[in-house]
Image: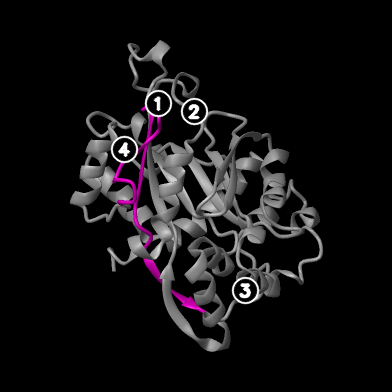
Amino acid sequence: MHFNTNIPIENILKALFEPYRKNVEDVDFINAEMVKAGMIAKPEDIENDHIAFRTLGVPNLGLKSIEKIFLHHGYQKRDHFYFEAKKLDAYWYAPPKELYPRIFISELRVNDLSQQAQNIITKYTKTITKDPADSLDLNNTEQVGNFFYQPLWEIPTIEDYDLLAAESEYASWVIYNRYYLNHYTISVHNLPSPYNKLEEFNRFLENIGIVLNTSGGKIKTSKDGLLKQSSSVAKMITANFANGKTKKISGSYVEFAERLPLKAYEKENTQGLDREKRRDGFEAGNADRIFESTYDEQTKRSS
């Protein structure tokens, strides 16, 4: 999306997106290939469907902390989701204007983990005695943007990372990456035909070498059939752990979404159809599988 630096929320979104874009090589690569294919004239033409964050459900952190930033800038809290197997809660947030991405924030139910896993997480987060979001000037966009990439706790040891990963790969991802942007999402339905259908867009992605998440199938479809999602598999990055040790771990990834028209509007010209006329929100079954884009079973397929 194009950012207007005179608008605070757009500055925050830009500050969030730029470090992610520079570190997730698939972002610029896919953008360049989309330009080559004539889907877009420039990367700013892409509509960002949503961005997502992962958090830890511990005192002074988690969902209640990070959401303050977006609620302050006009986002509205919507549906709750519970992922029993992954021990997660999540909410999505509707933007104040259609041109902004939706926000999806998930939170690990730390108290549902084993005592060993809880102890590891507590070891790193116990020094945070007040909500760090409360110390931010929420109108200072540079300060807020930097917040998502600042070290909220000490870098973990490889041993602690591995112990967490054995029980919850979500937990290990967050303990290393903290609030780093987990993914952004290309709105496929607003692309020119035939790429406005996720099946065709996925073919394009695979033809340029993008490895797709196959958990639950390459396309995850909502029960009503109106929300289709797929995602790339996170690339492996070199992580610098405590005591100078390094290891390859999963980074962030890119998601792709097709939101079909609601029944009342399915016969309209769908090109450029307003968001309110398309399927909104999220689907627990889809999101459950998308989480696995950073999981070992998927990432080992791209290594």
Quadrant for residue 285, please give it: top left
Gap between marks 1 and 2 measured at Cα: 12 Å
Quadrant for residue 116, please give it: bottom right
Q: Which residues are magenta?
A: 214-240
Image height check: is 293 above or below 50?
below
Question: Percent position (x, y) of residue 271?
Answer: 34, 22
Gap between marks 1 and 3 measured at Cα: 40 Å
Q: Which residue ends up furthest to the left in the rendered image? A: 207
Residue 116's disc is 3
Question: Percent position (x, y) of residue 270?
Answer: 34, 19
Q: Secondary structure at mark 1?
A: loop
Q: How is the image coloured?
A: one colour
Q: Secondary structure at mark 2?
A: loop
Circles 1 and 3: CB atoms closer than 8 Å: no
Mark 4, other Cα within 10 Å: few <14 / some 14–19 / many ≥20 = some
Mark 2, other Cα within 10 Å: few <14 / some 14–19 / many ≥20 = some
Q: Which one is earlier in the sequence, the residue at label 4 or at label 1?
A: 4
Q: Which one is earlier in the sequence, the residue at label 3 or at label 4?
A: 4
Residue behind mark 4: 40
Gap between marks 4 and 2 measured at Cα: 24 Å
Point out the frontmost of discs 3 and 4. 3
Q: What is the three-letter code of the residue carrying label 4?
A: Ile
Q: What is the three-letter code of the residue carrying label 3?
A: Gln
Point out the frontmost of discs 4 and 1. 1
Residue 280's disc is 2
Point out the frontmost of discs 3 and 2. 3
Q: What is the three-letter code of the residue carrying label 2?
A: Asp
